[in-house]
Amino acid sequence: MITHPSRLLKTAGFLLSLVALFPMPVQAQKNGVRLLKNEAERKVEVYLGEELFTAYYYPDTIEKPVLYPINASGGIEITRGFPLAPRPGERIDHPHHIGHWMNYGDVNALDFWNNSSAIPADKKSKYGTVRHTGITALKEGKKQGVLEVTMDWLAPTGQVLIKEKTQFIFSQEGDKRIIDRITTLTAQDTEVNFKDNKEGVFAIRMARELEHPSNKPELFTDSNGIPTTVASLNNEGVSGNYRSSNGKEGDAVWGTRGTWVSLDGIVAQKKISVVILDNPKNPGYPTFWHARGYGLFAANPLGQKEFSGGKEVLNFKLNAGESTTFKYRILVYSGENPSEVQLAAESTKFGQD
Protein backbone atom coordinates (compact mmCIF):
# COMPACT_ATOMS: atom_id res chain seq x y z
CA MET A 1 0.00 0.00 0.00
CA ILE A 2 1.32 3.42 -0.97
CA THR A 3 0.73 6.25 1.51
CA HIS A 4 -0.36 9.51 -0.06
CA PRO A 5 2.30 12.29 0.21
CA SER A 6 -0.18 14.66 1.86
CA ARG A 7 -0.77 12.14 4.64
CA LEU A 8 2.98 11.78 5.19
CA LEU A 9 3.32 15.55 5.46
CA LYS A 10 0.48 15.69 8.02
CA THR A 11 2.12 12.93 10.08
CA ALA A 12 5.50 14.68 9.99
CA GLY A 13 3.87 17.94 11.05
CA PHE A 14 2.13 16.19 13.94
CA LEU A 15 5.41 14.64 15.14
CA LEU A 16 7.19 17.99 14.95
CA SER A 17 4.45 19.60 17.03
CA LEU A 18 4.90 16.87 19.67
CA VAL A 19 8.63 17.56 19.79
CA ALA A 20 7.94 21.27 20.24
CA LEU A 21 5.51 20.59 23.06
CA PHE A 22 7.61 17.91 24.76
CA PRO A 23 11.25 18.53 23.83
CA MET A 24 13.62 15.67 24.50
CA PRO A 25 17.01 16.62 25.90
CA VAL A 26 19.60 16.40 23.16
CA GLN A 27 23.11 15.07 23.76
CA ALA A 28 24.56 18.58 24.01
CA GLN A 29 22.10 19.37 26.79
CA LYS A 30 22.93 16.16 28.64
CA ASN A 31 26.67 16.61 28.44
CA GLY A 32 27.00 20.38 28.29
CA VAL A 33 27.36 23.07 30.93
CA ARG A 34 24.16 24.88 31.90
CA LEU A 35 23.91 28.08 33.96
CA LEU A 36 20.54 28.72 35.59
CA LYS A 37 20.00 32.20 36.99
CA ASN A 38 17.65 32.49 39.96
CA GLU A 39 17.37 36.17 40.86
CA ALA A 40 14.81 35.51 43.60
CA GLU A 41 17.31 33.34 45.49
CA ARG A 42 20.30 35.45 44.41
CA LYS A 43 22.23 32.63 42.77
CA VAL A 44 23.34 31.14 39.47
CA GLU A 45 23.38 27.34 39.49
CA VAL A 46 25.95 25.49 37.39
CA TYR A 47 24.96 22.11 35.99
CA LEU A 48 27.17 19.59 34.23
CA GLY A 49 24.60 17.66 32.28
CA GLU A 50 21.89 16.86 34.83
CA GLU A 51 24.12 17.18 37.92
CA LEU A 52 24.56 20.29 40.03
CA PHE A 53 28.24 21.23 40.12
CA THR A 54 28.10 24.45 42.11
CA ALA A 55 26.25 27.76 42.44
CA TYR A 56 27.43 31.35 42.49
CA TYR A 57 25.57 32.61 45.57
CA TYR A 58 25.33 36.31 46.42
CA PRO A 59 22.67 37.12 49.05
CA ASP A 60 23.08 40.18 51.26
CA THR A 61 22.87 37.90 54.32
CA ILE A 62 26.53 36.87 53.90
CA GLU A 63 29.47 39.25 53.66
CA LYS A 64 30.81 38.20 50.25
CA PRO A 65 29.66 36.19 47.21
CA VAL A 66 30.65 32.52 47.26
CA LEU A 67 30.53 29.33 45.24
CA TYR A 68 28.39 26.97 47.30
CA PRO A 69 28.05 24.04 47.36
CA ILE A 70 30.78 22.42 45.27
CA ASN A 71 30.05 18.83 44.24
CA ALA A 72 32.28 16.13 42.80
CA SER A 73 30.99 13.84 40.07
CA GLY A 74 28.06 11.78 41.31
CA GLY A 75 26.76 14.60 43.49
CA ILE A 76 29.33 14.12 46.27
CA GLU A 77 29.53 17.38 48.24
CA ILE A 78 33.11 18.41 49.03
CA THR A 79 32.36 21.67 50.86
CA ARG A 80 31.21 22.09 54.47
CA GLY A 81 27.50 22.78 54.93
CA PHE A 82 27.74 25.12 57.94
CA PRO A 83 26.61 27.88 58.25
CA LEU A 84 24.20 27.77 55.29
CA ALA A 85 23.06 24.13 55.48
CA PRO A 86 24.64 22.41 58.53
CA ARG A 87 25.10 18.66 58.41
CA PRO A 88 25.38 16.33 61.44
CA GLY A 89 28.92 15.89 62.76
CA GLU A 90 30.36 19.04 61.15
CA ARG A 91 32.51 21.61 62.87
CA ILE A 92 30.68 24.89 63.49
CA ASP A 93 33.73 27.14 63.82
CA HIS A 94 34.64 30.10 61.57
CA PRO A 95 31.19 31.07 60.21
CA HIS A 96 32.91 33.20 57.53
CA HIS A 97 34.22 30.01 55.88
CA ILE A 98 31.56 29.30 53.24
CA GLY A 99 32.17 27.17 50.15
CA HIS A 100 34.74 28.93 47.95
CA TRP A 101 35.48 32.63 48.35
CA MET A 102 38.20 35.19 47.71
CA ASN A 103 39.08 38.13 49.97
CA TYR A 104 41.73 39.23 52.49
CA GLY A 105 42.34 39.95 56.16
CA ASP A 106 43.95 43.40 55.96
CA VAL A 107 42.86 45.84 53.26
CA ASN A 108 43.58 49.41 54.37
CA ALA A 109 43.43 48.03 57.93
CA LEU A 110 39.97 46.52 57.37
CA ASP A 111 39.36 42.80 57.84
CA PHE A 112 37.37 41.42 54.90
CA TRP A 113 38.26 37.79 55.63
CA ASN A 114 36.71 37.35 59.08
CA ASN A 115 33.55 39.36 58.51
CA SER A 116 30.28 37.48 59.08
CA SER A 117 26.88 37.82 60.71
CA ALA A 118 28.54 36.67 63.93
CA ILE A 119 30.41 39.99 64.30
CA PRO A 120 28.60 42.28 66.80
CA ALA A 121 27.30 45.55 65.39
CA ASP A 122 29.61 47.60 67.61
CA LYS A 123 32.63 45.82 66.08
CA LYS A 124 31.62 46.09 62.42
CA SER A 125 33.66 49.28 61.89
CA LYS A 126 36.79 47.10 61.67
CA TYR A 127 35.47 44.91 58.88
CA GLY A 128 35.00 45.21 55.12
CA THR A 129 32.31 43.66 52.91
CA VAL A 130 32.33 42.41 49.30
CA ARG A 131 29.03 43.00 47.51
CA HIS A 132 27.83 41.56 44.20
CA THR A 133 26.96 44.35 41.75
CA GLY A 134 26.11 42.59 38.51
CA ILE A 135 26.28 39.70 36.04
CA THR A 136 27.94 40.82 32.83
CA ALA A 137 28.08 37.51 30.94
CA LEU A 138 26.43 34.11 31.21
CA LYS A 139 27.40 31.63 28.49
CA GLU A 140 26.49 27.96 28.25
CA GLY A 141 28.27 25.44 26.04
CA LYS A 142 29.01 21.82 25.25
CA LYS A 143 32.52 21.99 26.75
CA GLN A 144 32.39 24.87 29.22
CA GLY A 145 30.22 27.49 30.83
CA VAL A 146 31.34 31.05 31.56
CA LEU A 147 29.99 33.36 34.23
CA GLU A 148 31.28 36.93 34.51
CA VAL A 149 30.36 39.03 37.53
CA THR A 150 31.27 42.31 39.21
CA MET A 151 31.66 43.14 42.90
CA ASP A 152 32.55 46.08 45.13
CA TRP A 153 34.91 45.86 48.11
CA LEU A 154 33.32 48.25 50.59
CA ALA A 155 34.51 50.02 53.73
CA PRO A 156 31.97 50.22 56.59
CA THR A 157 31.28 53.83 55.51
CA GLY A 158 30.11 52.58 52.10
CA GLN A 159 33.23 53.83 50.33
CA VAL A 160 34.20 51.60 47.39
CA LEU A 161 37.86 50.70 47.87
CA ILE A 162 38.10 48.13 45.07
CA LYS A 163 36.04 47.18 42.05
CA GLU A 164 36.28 43.51 41.14
CA LYS A 165 35.68 41.79 37.81
CA THR A 166 35.65 38.01 37.98
CA GLN A 167 35.31 35.38 35.29
CA PHE A 168 34.43 31.82 36.31
CA ILE A 169 34.95 29.05 33.76
CA PHE A 170 33.29 25.70 34.55
CA SER A 171 34.16 22.50 32.71
CA GLN A 172 34.63 18.74 33.04
CA GLU A 173 36.96 16.07 31.68
CA GLY A 174 35.53 12.66 32.53
CA ASP A 175 35.13 12.58 36.33
CA LYS A 176 37.47 15.55 36.80
CA ARG A 177 35.62 18.82 37.33
CA ILE A 178 37.30 22.19 36.80
CA ILE A 179 36.74 25.75 38.02
CA ASP A 180 38.92 28.56 36.71
CA ARG A 181 38.69 31.90 38.48
CA ILE A 182 40.22 35.01 36.90
CA THR A 183 39.76 38.01 39.20
CA THR A 184 40.86 41.57 38.45
CA LEU A 185 40.92 44.04 41.35
CA THR A 186 41.06 47.78 40.60
CA ALA A 187 41.72 50.37 43.31
CA GLN A 188 39.32 53.30 43.13
CA ASP A 189 39.92 56.81 44.48
CA THR A 190 42.58 55.96 47.02
CA GLU A 191 45.67 53.79 47.43
CA VAL A 192 44.82 50.29 48.64
CA ASN A 193 47.27 48.46 50.91
CA PHE A 194 47.23 44.72 51.47
CA LYS A 195 49.42 44.46 54.56
CA ASP A 196 50.98 41.01 55.02
CA ASN A 197 48.37 38.87 56.80
CA LYS A 198 47.82 35.14 57.05
CA GLU A 199 44.07 35.45 56.37
CA GLY A 200 43.55 35.07 52.62
CA VAL A 201 43.22 34.87 49.68
CA PHE A 202 41.73 32.09 47.53
CA ALA A 203 39.93 29.66 49.80
CA ILE A 204 37.65 26.63 50.18
CA ARG A 205 36.16 25.24 53.40
CA MET A 206 36.14 21.49 53.02
CA ALA A 207 33.62 18.84 54.08
CA ARG A 208 34.27 17.01 57.36
CA GLU A 209 35.36 13.83 55.51
CA LEU A 210 38.26 15.73 53.92
CA GLU A 211 39.65 17.16 57.15
CA HIS A 212 42.73 15.69 58.79
CA PRO A 213 41.84 13.23 61.56
CA SER A 214 42.47 15.04 64.86
CA ASN A 215 42.18 13.91 68.47
CA LYS A 216 42.70 17.25 70.16
CA PRO A 217 40.97 20.64 70.26
CA GLU A 218 42.87 23.52 68.69
CA LEU A 219 42.82 27.27 69.30
CA PHE A 220 43.28 29.77 66.46
CA THR A 221 43.46 33.57 66.69
CA ASP A 222 42.43 35.90 63.87
CA SER A 223 44.05 39.20 62.88
CA ASN A 224 41.90 41.07 65.42
CA GLY A 225 43.09 38.88 68.28
CA ILE A 226 39.77 37.00 68.53
CA PRO A 227 40.33 33.34 69.49
CA THR A 228 38.35 30.45 67.99
CA THR A 229 38.46 26.99 69.54
CA VAL A 230 38.23 24.16 67.00
CA ALA A 231 37.02 21.13 68.94
CA SER A 232 38.16 17.56 68.44
CA LEU A 233 35.42 15.40 66.94
CA ASN A 234 34.67 11.77 66.10
CA ASN A 235 37.13 10.84 63.35
CA GLU A 236 35.05 8.08 61.81
CA GLY A 237 35.06 8.58 58.04
CA VAL A 238 37.61 11.42 58.23
CA SER A 239 40.52 10.78 55.87
CA GLY A 240 41.93 14.04 54.47
CA ASN A 241 45.61 14.54 53.74
CA TYR A 242 47.37 17.45 52.01
CA ARG A 243 50.13 16.92 49.42
CA SER A 244 52.18 19.78 47.99
CA SER A 245 54.31 20.31 44.91
CA ASN A 246 57.23 20.90 47.31
CA GLY A 247 57.00 17.35 48.69
CA LYS A 248 55.35 18.30 51.99
CA GLU A 249 52.38 16.38 53.38
CA GLY A 250 49.73 16.84 56.03
CA ASP A 251 50.09 19.73 58.47
CA ALA A 252 53.62 20.37 57.16
CA VAL A 253 52.09 22.00 54.06
CA TRP A 254 50.90 25.02 56.07
CA GLY A 255 53.10 28.10 55.66
CA THR A 256 55.15 26.70 52.77
CA ARG A 257 55.33 27.74 49.13
CA GLY A 258 54.21 25.56 46.25
CA THR A 259 52.69 25.66 42.79
CA TRP A 260 49.90 23.21 43.70
CA VAL A 261 48.38 21.45 46.69
CA SER A 262 46.07 18.44 46.61
CA LEU A 263 43.73 17.46 49.44
CA ASP A 264 43.03 13.73 49.16
CA GLY A 265 40.49 11.60 50.97
CA ILE A 266 37.51 9.29 50.72
CA VAL A 267 33.93 10.59 50.64
CA ALA A 268 30.91 8.33 50.18
CA GLN A 269 33.32 5.40 49.66
CA LYS A 270 34.97 7.15 46.70
CA LYS A 271 38.46 8.53 46.33
CA ILE A 272 38.24 12.31 46.13
CA SER A 273 40.99 14.88 45.47
CA VAL A 274 40.53 18.64 45.52
CA VAL A 275 43.45 20.53 43.97
CA ILE A 276 44.28 24.23 43.83
CA LEU A 277 46.72 25.34 41.14
CA ASP A 278 48.63 28.62 41.33
CA ASN A 279 49.55 30.54 38.18
CA PRO A 280 52.98 32.05 37.36
CA LYS A 281 51.40 35.41 36.51
CA ASN A 282 49.89 35.82 39.99
CA PRO A 283 51.38 38.27 42.50
CA GLY A 284 53.59 36.49 45.02
CA TYR A 285 54.01 33.32 42.91
CA PRO A 286 54.55 30.63 44.04
CA THR A 287 51.95 31.13 46.72
CA PHE A 288 52.18 30.30 50.40
CA TRP A 289 49.55 27.79 51.57
CA HIS A 290 47.16 28.57 54.42
CA ALA A 291 46.05 24.92 54.57
CA ARG A 292 44.67 23.80 57.93
CA GLY A 293 43.86 20.26 58.95
CA TYR A 294 40.42 21.31 60.21
CA GLY A 295 39.25 22.01 56.66
CA LEU A 296 40.44 25.48 55.60
CA PHE A 297 42.23 25.10 52.25
CA ALA A 298 43.62 28.40 50.98
CA ALA A 299 46.31 29.89 48.75
CA ASN A 300 47.70 33.13 50.17
CA PRO A 301 50.43 34.87 48.15
CA LEU A 302 50.08 38.15 50.08
CA GLY A 303 50.85 37.05 53.66
CA GLN A 304 54.56 36.48 53.16
CA LYS A 305 55.79 38.00 56.43
CA GLU A 306 53.40 35.83 58.46
CA PHE A 307 54.33 32.59 56.74
CA SER A 308 58.08 33.16 56.49
CA GLY A 309 58.56 34.23 60.10
CA GLY A 310 59.52 37.73 58.96
CA LYS A 311 62.16 36.61 56.45
CA GLU A 312 60.08 37.84 53.50
CA VAL A 313 57.83 40.90 53.33
CA LEU A 314 55.50 41.89 50.48
CA ASN A 315 52.96 44.47 51.73
CA PHE A 316 51.30 44.48 48.32
CA LYS A 317 49.58 47.70 47.26
CA LEU A 318 47.57 49.21 44.43
CA ASN A 319 47.77 52.91 43.61
CA ALA A 320 44.49 54.69 42.84
CA GLY A 321 43.28 53.42 39.47
CA GLU A 322 45.79 50.55 39.38
CA SER A 323 44.72 46.94 38.78
CA THR A 324 46.04 43.46 39.47
CA THR A 325 44.79 40.05 38.33
CA PHE A 326 44.71 36.69 40.13
CA LYS A 327 44.15 33.43 38.27
CA TYR A 328 43.57 30.11 40.02
CA ARG A 329 42.23 26.69 39.05
CA ILE A 330 40.33 24.20 41.20
CA LEU A 331 40.33 20.54 40.13
CA VAL A 332 37.85 18.13 41.73
CA TYR A 333 38.70 14.48 41.06
CA SER A 334 36.25 11.66 41.75
CA GLY A 335 37.35 8.02 41.79
CA GLU A 336 41.09 8.73 41.92
CA ASN A 337 43.83 10.54 43.80
CA PRO A 338 46.07 11.82 40.99
CA SER A 339 49.81 11.22 41.15
CA GLU A 340 52.43 13.92 41.63
CA VAL A 341 53.38 13.45 37.97
CA GLN A 342 49.78 14.09 36.88
CA LEU A 343 49.51 17.18 39.07
CA ALA A 344 52.84 18.56 37.86
CA ALA A 345 51.53 18.22 34.30
CA GLU A 346 48.27 19.96 35.25
CA SER A 347 50.25 22.77 36.86
CA THR A 348 52.44 23.22 33.77
CA LYS A 349 49.41 23.21 31.48
CA PHE A 350 47.63 25.83 33.61
CA GLY A 351 50.71 28.01 33.60
CA GLN A 352 50.68 28.00 29.81
CA ASP A 353 46.96 28.75 29.40
Image (tube, rainbow, N blue to C red):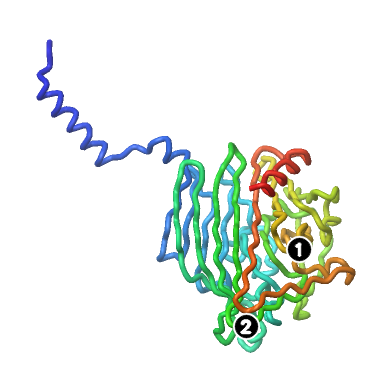
Q: Residues within 10 Å of mark 1 (few under 14, many from 20)?
A: some
The residue singled out by tag 1 in the image is 284
Depth check, front residue: 90 or 262: 262
Viewer-nearest residue: 329 or 62: 329
Look at 70% across and 63% down and name the residue there. Answer: 91
Q: Is residue 93 left or right of residue 241?
A: left
Disc 2/disc 1 C-alpha distance (Å): 22 Å
SS under mark 1: loop
Mark closer to the chain start, 2 or 1: 2
The x, y position of residue 326, in whole percent, is 65, 61
The correct choice, above or below, for 243 with respect to 2 in the image is: below
Quadrant assignment, res 122: bottom right
Q: Quadrant of the N terminus?
A: top left
Residue 236 in sight here: no
Query: What is the x, y in percent for residue 115?
Result: 64, 76
Residue 299, how many percent across, how many down?
A: 73, 60
Residue corresponding to mark 2? 190
Give the vertical position of 309 relative to 329 (above or below): below
Q: Quadrant of residue 97?
A: bottom right
Report whether 56 appears left or right of 319: left
Q: Nearer the viewer, residue 39 or 220?
A: 39
- Residue 291 in percent (x, y) is at 77, 59
Kind of residue indicated by mark 2: Thr
